[in-house]
Image: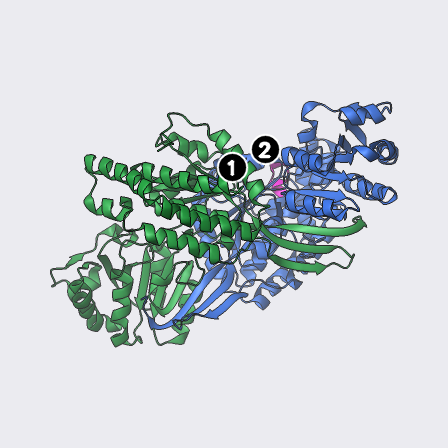
Chain colours: A green, B blue
Amino acid sequence: MAQTVLESLDLLQMGKRAKAAAALLARKSTPDKNAALLAIADALDANILSILEANQRDLELAVRNGVDPIWIRDRIDLEKRTADIIADVRKVAELPDPVGEVLLDSTLENGLQLIKRRTPLGVLGTIYESRPNVTVDVSTLALKTSNAVILRGGSDVLYSNMRLTEVMQDVLAAHDFPAEAIQYISSTDRRYVTEMLRLYEYIDMIIPRGGNGLHTFCRENSSIPVITGGIGVCHIFVDESAQLDKVLPVLDNAKTQRPAVCNSMETLLVHRDIAEEILPQVVAVLGEAGVEFHAGERAYQIVGGDERVLPAADDDFDTEWYNLTLNLKVVEDVDEAIAHIERHGTQHSDSILTETASHAERFLNEVDSAAVYWNASTRFTDGSALGMGAEVAISTQKLHARGPMALEELTTYKWIVKGDYTSRP
Amino acid sequence: MAQTVLESLDLLQMGKRAKAAAALLARKSTPDKNAALLAIADALDANILSILEANQRDLELAVRNGVDPIWIRDRIDLEKRTADIIADVRKVAELPDPVGEVLLDSTLENGLQLIKRRTPLGVLGTIYESRPNVTVDVSTLALKTSNAVILRGGSDVLYSNMRLTEVMQDVLAAHDFPAEAIQYISSTDRRYVTEMLRLYEYIDMIIPRGGNGLHTFCRENSSIPVITGGIGVCHIFVDESAQLDKVLPVLDNAKTQRPAVCNSMETLLVHRDIAEEILPQVVAVLGEAGVEFHAGERAYQIVGGDERVLPAADDDFDTEWYNLTLNLKVVEDVDEAIAHIERHGTQHSDSILTETASHAERFLNEVDSAAVYWNASTRFTDGSALGMGAEVAISTQKLHARGPMALEELTTYKWIVKGDYTSRP
């Protein structure tokens, strides 16, 4: 392994190099970028042994530090994931390149030709926790859109991330691309995160990927625009008119398919008129899959007898469980459901199951979340499930991008104006 | 005047009220919003005397405080502007409403209907200096797009702004709109700006309108996304092949038409092969209009004999003059022009005057500014000049919006997904 953990880093220099690299990337053609991406896929494949060797070093450190084995398997261990990572890179090469797209082309009354054209953002800063696949995901989506990246991953996958970065940098250099288009902050000292968040002159957008604490830290400390997201206290409201036989599979899907992702359901709201019928079924079916329930007062009156049901504590309805816990609450009607979501939701993904179109319309209009669903599981909020071909993050803020972010969301635009020595009257 | 200057304000309560108002505004129809806008125009007209009375109070304070008379006339005195302000409100009523626009409507392979629909942002926070027309501009553009606003204007127009707000609030209340859709921070204590910038839960976007210091302060202290912009060190590069007889009117327009706006030219770059021909003409023609020149070394060798020409100091090329000062610099070629702009520009508006298409293409592609021009004055970077019908600010950052921001730029979108009790495979 050539790269070593640096004792001190010059982030200002990294920022300058990234900005210079971005200017060069902006001039690269789509075929050249795709060739570089395919070469990265090949190089990851060819260097698999040294990548897993670096990953082994992270795994050994994690074991020595007493890290939870489930965390190690889910977040650190790369062995079973390399094929997927490499396949994803090839997929990015196949996606259409949004850079250069003409969003508007018109001639004004004064004869000026006005073109609004999609351009790269410039330099992206990504701060993330564990999961070394993010290193490759973000780098390749950035490369496809002619953006440079500065990456800062979790300390428990440092060696894996550094080796992955090195492999990608070597490919860039061999393909006449600037190697500094992908830079990794090879120190686990948190002060570099703070320094990175102040590189306003050199970084155009910060994408945090991690828990609520990381997002808050970035928002509070960054002078660079931050894309906040990924925190999902998602709800499903079962209205009185829902077809109850079709409801249970949707609830099961939303809660148990992947409980530790942000688009899974954390709170089930049920209309009071069907609560006595549906709640015992929910407890029986989802309970079978290992779900434990935290029930509000009225729900507890109905299903409190089951040993898997506990009374809900005050802040349970504001908690992103990330596990097989589900809050249960009985509401009066669609109004109370909307009000509950407004108060406790995180503007991520919320769904109504109903046969009453007017209730669905109100829910879809008034619930102010990135994705709102009618008769569907919240699990679809994801770049690939919504047909965007990729995903770099899920935004729950409203500026720039909302919901899944893929290639287009890594671009901006410029106004190009052509005249004939035209002055403004 | 009913409203008085408050000694202490509860910004958290203002934020909560704004958010509640935004939820109500989101349900208002376009005809209802337009009716409210026209009623605001009528009410401003009907209340003109009390508005000018409040303005008189600001004027007297300004005179007593020894404020520069030019500043008073340009920034504080409302008397000659009320007709324009009222006309602008009527124009906003006529503009198309972007809210509700369907940006995408498709059916996925699994049968899910996917709709991407334009929605209001929610709550806008605007911090601005002087110019009471901004109070009405921003409020009415926000109302048109169903956004609530919290306004914080300059201390020297406090009474004018408060009276204008009051007139608009009365109309809202009379039209069954929430009066809290437009709120004004009626204290000049700067700590309320800082408090406002931390209302992350309640404000969705901060739009500063003012000098570099205000923008920097907002970026450094806000946990809410900030739209940075309005700082313009704009360039025109005259290439060797430009038609010199057509060049002078464009330069004159860019520099002297409105020197104190952000899209006016601050630096003229000229190709070395035409420098000796064009620079004396520039000094003669623009000098006639009162322009003073700060010339780089080679330019000074050519026109340094003229008394209106001073040698440029080091940081002149980074200065937004906002007056009739113009930097002059001779460059080798289009490469040096692009490099100069990359180093000294503010990514606002830059222009090339040339007959060489390949040079123009390079300039338009490589200069990374919100607006890039070929054979035109930089003065066109403005919402109305580019056919957007309005302008709330000019963004020189790359996220969310770039260049002039009008109605669409005050919106976001949501994903609406309709299924048939659909689960994710």
Q: Is A177 in front, or is B79?
A: A177
Image disc number at residue B213: 2
Mark 1 = which residue? A18
Closest to the observer, B133 or B203:
B203
Find the distance from the CA under tag 2 to the CA under tag 1: 26 Å
Task: Name the side, left or right, on which A403 lies relative to B85.
Answer: left
- Contact? badges 2 and 1 (CB < 8 Å): no
Residue type indicated by callout 2: Gly
Residue B157 lies in magenta, yes or no? yes
- Where residue B416 appears, x then y in whole percent? 44, 65
Residue range in magenta is B153-159
- How would you classify the magenta stretch by its main secondary structure? helix
Q: Nearer the viewer, residue A142 or B376?
A: A142
Q: Position of residue A143 (x, y in %)?
A: 49, 47
Q: Residue at x 68, y 31 (%)?
A: B319
Q: For the point 33% across and 37% down, which residue is it?
A: A158
**Rendered-image quadrant of the N terminus of chain A:** top left
